[in-house]
Every structure is written in C-alpha cells, then in structure tokens.
Image (tube, rainbow, N blue to C red):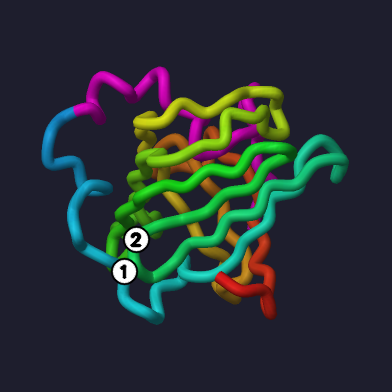
Amino acid sequence: MPQSVRPASPRPLALFALALAAALVLPGHAADRADTPAPNHPLIGVWRLSLDAGRCAETYRFRQDGSSLVTSAGEVSESAYAIGAKPSARGFYKLEDRIVRDNGKPDCSGEVMRVGARTTNYLQFHPGGDMFLMCASETLDVCIGPFERIRGEKI
C-alpha cells in the first residue's frame, strides 16, 4: 500500500468536517439511517492509527450495528456511521460519519470534537484486509494512514 500524505490535522474523522459541513447537514443523511454493514464487512473490528511518530495513537472500534467508538489521547467519542457494502469502481468504500457523543477532552491533535459534526471519507483497504487508508476523495492524493487492524480486542 502506498505511503500516505498526512493532512495538517491528524484526526481523520474530523479531517474534512469544515469543508463538508454544509453538504452533510441535510436530513436523511446516510449515517442517520438504520442501515448496518454486513457482519463480514471489512471495516468491522478494531483499528489503530499511530500519529506523531508513534507518540499518540487513535483506536477505532467499528461495530456491526453502525456505531463506532474512538479513543484519541484524552478523548472518547462515539459516532453513527454508514459505509458502502462494496467498493466503488475505483476501489474505495464511502464512509459517512456523525459524532453523537464526546467527552470534551482533546484528541491527539489537541482538538475537541463537536457533537453533531459530520464527515465523508473514502477508505481503501489493503488486499490482505489488515490495513486501510482514509482519503478525502476517491484518489490517494490526500490520505491518512495506514490504519492497522488490531486482533483480539473487544469491538
């Protein structure tokens, strides 16, 4: 998997919130629906993203019920998410996310997440299934990662 280019803010799910906020506040947003990924979806599980040369890490628990739990430095946040059942023709899964709870503490980048913030990102999984990149669009131009699967931890 190619090495990624890190955007200025290391918090991937908040990475594009400001740029996409207006487009994502519409009613009926996918992350609000009851749709849930299949139990064998490649995203389901625990993932870790190491930041700042390994001095800080974020852990993402993507559950099959469409919820996720993220820990990053002192922050603990929960989200509702929706993800495509299959990748696009370009090989990316569209991930839509909405933060539903946050403890108000700073994440690895020093930011505090805002409840209600929505983002859309595009994931490309390594063929082995144990890594993915999170990108701003369906290209590898602006991505963060790799996210690495952590086995043996409770989702």
Tell me if label 2 and label 1 are in contact, CB under 8 Å: yes
Instruction: Give x and y (percent) for residue 155.
Output: 55, 70
Instruction: Say which residue appears at 81% left-offset and 35% top-offset.
Output: 52
Query: Quadrant where the N terminus lies?
Result: bottom right
Instruction: Give x and y (percent) for residue 88.
Output: 30, 58
Crowding around mark 2 (Cα neighbors within 10 Å: few <14, some 14 to 19, many 20+) is many
On screen, residue 73 above or below 84: above
Crowding around mark 1 (Cα neighbors within 10 Å: few <14, some 14 to 19, many 20+) is many
Instruction: Say which residue appears at 65% left-offset and 35% top-offset.
Output: 5
Q: Amino acid at mark 2?
A: Gly
Bounds of the magenta segment:
1-25
Q: Amino acid at mark 1?
A: Pro
- Judging by the rendered image, the residue that carries numbered circle 2 is 66
Name the element at disc 1: loop
- Judging by the rendered image, the residue that carries numbered circle 1 is 37
In the image, which is nearer the foreground, mark 2 or mark 1? 2
Q: Between 75 and 31, which is closer to the camera in this rendering? A: 75
